[in-house]
Image (cartoon, grey):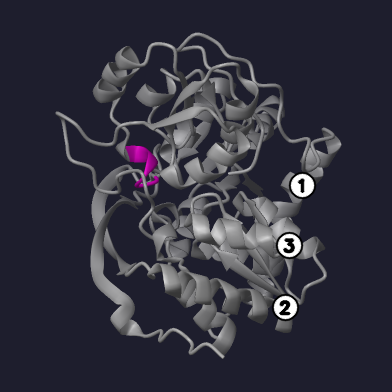
Amino acid sequence: MNTPVPINIERMEHIKRIEFDRPRVNIPGSTIAGSTLSVDHAWAKVFTEPNPAERIELKARIKRLLKEQNAVLVAHYYVHPDLQDLAEETGGCVSDSLEMARFGSNHPAQTVVVCGVRFMGETAKILNPEKRVLMPELEAECSLDLGCPPDEFAAFCDAHPDRTVVVYANTSAAVKARADWMVTSSIGLKIVAHLHAQGKKIIWAPDRHLGGYIQTQTGGDMLLWQGSCLVHDEFKTAELIELRKQHPNAKLLVHPEAPASIVALADVVGSTTQIIKAAQTLDATEFIVATDKGIFHKMKSAAPGKNFIEAPTAGNSATCKSCAQCPWMAMNGLANLALVLENGKNEIQVDPLVGLRAKQSIQRMLDFAQGLNLTQGQTQIPIITQAPGTSEHGIGPA
């Protein structure tokens, strides 16, 4: 019998200091949520990659433990390729945050193991309160979540009681519980358009870029929380223009969490799911991709023979901080996945009352999608390639 690979804190190389946007609430009377924007700091662990022999042993151990514990593995597109492959090899799924939670809900396994960041584990628990939800790393955060503290956000909402509260999936359970609606990246367009047509005024949180994009597309009356994704906020416009000159036939695929100047250059703007779909369906053979580079693993398998190029996060104007990779997604690995399956720690807990209120905001979105016949697997509109500056948006999860 093989000796298990030792797993301990010594496998961690160092702690990485992370800067993220921290909106400061100005109430009462403010017209922009968090209009005072400062920089705050958080931390991410950086782990040593297992060697080839360790990888083989860890994968075998994880597969055995998943089977023994009646557990299913769900992984986000942005985590390490090993985890994505393991999820699919063991009957789990690789997808966006909402479909990860949906899959766990529909799967008969009594334990759902979520490889992603903390809000994804919370969403899985909200939709599966009766199941055990584990994560390899509970300290895997999200800059959008960190930049929208529940108490401050609740105070801002209370100061604007005439507004309908719409929040993005990348938020804590407590923020979702304070919201009227939770939305995923681009179904937000249709939901905000629906609310706008009803004469509703909106508070949007937490991503200012996605909120600004939706506001521009819908004309809605929206107060925008001023958070941002530290990965997407880094894409550089001048360097991207130069890169496009070097690859004139490449199509530019952009996630709407990117700044407006990047979105304006896009051929397709869409969620992670739609970006992958674009790579599969467009007749181009080369793509520049402005989202977390963890998605490249799935894109390459979904569209073999096509070439994918990272949109620039550094250049003449700056050096990159995230370098197109979420440092918290990178905290998920084979070693801590095996460890959590062995010791049962890192279980996600959501207060039942908070979870119930949060589920109501999620359910409104799901009911709306169902009313539009946008069930999972049908949540993408046809992708239409247009000239840069007139990009097409899609409907899909984050």
Residue in the foreground of this view, choosing between 373 and 30:
373
Task: Give residue 364's position: percent from left, percent from top.
Answer: 75, 48
Q: CA distance from mark 1 to mark 3?
A: 25 Å
Find residue 91 and name its label: 3
Q: Is residue 181 above or below residue 69?
A: above
- Taking the spot 51% from the left edge, 71% from the top edge, the residue there is 56
Residue reaching furthest to the front: 1
Give the mark nearer the N terminus: 2 vs 3. Answer: 2
Residue 67 badge: 2
Query: Which residue type does callout 1 highlight?
Result: Leu
Q: Which residue is mark 1?
A: 366
Can you see residue 397? yes
Observer-nearest of 338 and 53: 53
- Residue 90 lies left or right of residue 299; in this view the side is right
Region of the chain picked out in magenta, as a range? 229-233
Residue 343 location (% of width, % of height):
55, 89
Mark with earlier residue (1, 2): 2
SS at circle 3: loop
Residue placed at 32% from the left, 33% from the top? 235
